[in-house]
C-alpha cells in the first residue's frame, strides 16, 4: 500500500536524503562543480567539471575540494617584502604592508626561520606569520584591542578614573588595551595591586577586597568581646552561638586549634593527610557536622556517602588516639546538636536519621 503524499491538496516535498544516489549527486554536483561516475563501496567516484580529474569523496553534500581549486603559491616567490605584500593583498588583506623579512636560526639544528614584520594603516608595527593571513581574517592586534576597547568598555582616561573612583581604587599607570595590566592602589588602606584592564568589574559588580587586609575570607564571621571568629560554615556559626548561650567565655573557645593537628592515612587513596578539629572548648576538642557532611544524608557534593563516612571514621579514631578528649556533635534540621559516637554503625545512623525527621513529624 503506497503512502499518501498529499496533505490538504498540497504535495509534500521529500528531503534530499530520501532520493537515490544519482539524484543527490545531481543536486550537489551543481553546487560543488563535480559529476558523479559511480559508487565505490562506501565512497563515491566523481570527476571535476573544471579540470576533468577524477577523485574519491566520502559525502556527496560535503565533498573535498579538487586540487585545481586550491590556490598554490610557490614559496620561493614569497621572499621579498613587495611580493609578500602583493600576495596578502590579493587574498583580501589590503590594510597591511610587509616592511621587513628577517631570517633567524632556531633550535639545536640551526634551521632557518622567516620572521615577517608588518605595518597596518594606522602605523602600528607587529609580527605575524603569513599562514595567519591565509587561514582566517587576521588584523593588527593593537587595532583589534582598540576596537574591542571602544565597543565593549569605552574607557577613556577620564572614564577610567571615574570608574576606579566608584570601585574605591586609584589607577597608577596608563593603560589602553584590554590585555594591559592596570596597577592601582586601594583608597581605604593604600595597599597596591594589579589587574588586567579587561577584568575590571562592570557597573553591576563590586571590586575584590584588598588581599593584604583580607588574606582569607570566611563564609561566616562573628565578633564577641573583641575576639573575632572567622568560620567556614553556618553549622559552625550556630554551634558557636550555642556555646555562648550555655555560658562559655570567648577566651575558653578556640577555632581550629593549632595544637590539635592529627596525621592520618586516607582510607581510599592511602596518602598521608592532616586533620584539624573545628573547636577546642577548654580541654576538649570538638568536631561539628551535619548529616550530609557526616556521610549519612544525601546532599553532600564532595563524595559518596560511603567514602565520606569511611574518611570521617578514620579521622575520628585518629583524633581519639592522639588527642584523648575528642567529641563529635551532629546538627539536625531543627538546629539542635546531639552528641554522637560510633556513627558509622547501623544503629547510630538510624538514631540520627530519626532525630533529623522530628521536625517533619512535629510540623504535621
Image (tube, grey):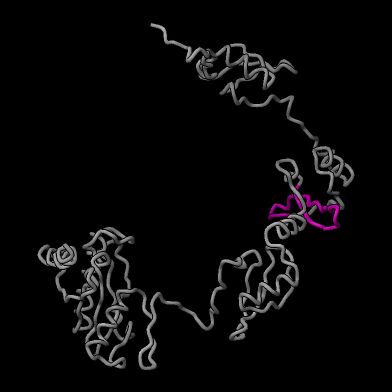
- Give the total of numbered labels: 0
Most extreme residue toward the left is 347
Which x, y percent locates residue 20?
A: 53, 12
Q: Quadrant of the C terminus?
A: bottom left
- Nearer to the camera, 28 or 80: 28
Taking the spot 23% from the left edge, 68% from the top edge, the residue there is 333
In x, y percent, where is residue 311? 25, 66
| Residue 316, quarter of the rendered image | bottom left
Residue toward you, 285 or 87? 285
Query: Is residue 119 in the magenta section?
Result: yes
In this orientation, does residue 344 appear? Answer: no
User: Does residue 325 belong to the magenta stretch?
Assistant: no
Quadrant that contains the N terminus: top left
Q: Is residue 217 above or below residue 270?
A: below
Q: Position of residue 312 (x, y in %)?
A: 24, 69
Q: Is residue 290 left or right of residue 189?
A: left
| Residue nearest the observer in this picture, 26 or 351 | 351
| 86 left or right of 282 in image | right
Is residue 92 in view from this perspective? yes
Residues shaded magenta: 106-129
Amino acid at each position: 500500500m503506497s503512502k499518501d503524499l498529499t496533505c490538504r491538496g498540497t504535495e509534500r516535498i521529500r528531503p534530499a536524503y530520501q532520493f537515490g544516489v544519482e539524484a543527490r549527486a545531481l543536486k550537489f554536483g551543481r553546487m560543488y562543480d563535480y559529476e558523479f561516475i559511480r559508487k565505490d563501496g562506501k565512497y563515491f567516484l566523481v570527476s571535476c567539471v573544471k579540470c576533468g580529474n577524477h577523485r574519491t569523496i566520502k559525502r556527496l553534500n560535503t565533498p573535498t575540494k579538487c586540487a585545481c581549486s586550491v590556490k598554490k603559491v610557490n614559496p620561493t616567490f614569497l621572499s621579498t617584502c613587495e611580493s609578500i605584500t602583493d600576495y596578502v593583498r590579493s587574498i583580501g588583506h589590503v590594510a597591511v604592508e610587509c616592511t621587513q623579512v628577517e631570517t633567524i636560526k632556531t633550535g639545536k639544528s640551526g634551521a632557518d626561520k622567516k620572521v615577517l614584520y608588518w605595518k597596518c594603516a594606522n602605523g602600528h608595527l607587529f609580527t605575524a606569520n603569513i599562514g595567519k593571513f591565509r587561514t582566517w581574517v587576521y588584523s593588527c592586534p593593537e587595532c583589534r584591542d582598540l576596537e574591542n576597547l571602544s565597543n565593549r568598555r569605552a574607557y577613556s582616561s577620564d572614564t577610567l578614573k571615574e570608574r576606579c573612583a566608584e570601585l574605591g581604587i586609584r589607577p597608577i599607570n596608563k593603560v589602553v588595551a584590554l590585555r594591559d595590566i592596570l596597577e592601582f592602589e586601594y583608597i581605604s588602606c593604600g595597599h597596591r595591586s594589579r589587574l588586567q584592564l579587561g577584568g575590571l568589574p562592570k557597573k553591576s559588580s563590586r571590586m575584590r577586597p584588598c588581599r593584604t587586609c583580607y588574606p582569607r575570607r570566611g563564609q561566616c564571621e562573628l565578633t564577641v568581646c573583641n575576639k573575632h571568629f572567622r568560620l567556614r560554615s553556618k553549622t559552625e556559626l550556630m554551634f558557636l552561638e550555642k556555646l555562648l548561650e550555655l555560658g562559655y567565655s570567648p577566651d575558653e573557645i578556640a577555632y581550629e586549634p593549632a595544637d590539635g593537628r592529627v596525621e592520618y592515612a586516607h582510607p581510599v587513596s592511602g596518602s598521608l593527610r592532616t586533620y584539624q578539629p573545628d573547636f577546642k572548648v577548654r580541654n576538649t576538642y570538638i568536631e561539628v557536622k551535619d548529616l550530609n557532611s557526616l556521610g549519612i544524608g544525601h546532599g553532600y557534593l564532595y563524595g559518596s556517602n560511603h567514602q565520606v563516612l569511611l574518611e570521617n571514621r578514620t579521622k575520628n579514631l585518629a583524633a581519639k588516639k592522639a588527642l584523648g578528649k575528642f567529641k563529635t556533635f551532629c546538627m539536625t534540621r531543627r538546629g539542635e546538636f546531639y552528641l554522637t559516637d560510633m556513627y558509622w554503625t547501623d544503629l547510630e545512623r538510624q538514631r540520627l536519621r530519626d532525630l533529623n525527621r522530628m521536625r517533619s513529624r512535629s510540623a504535621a
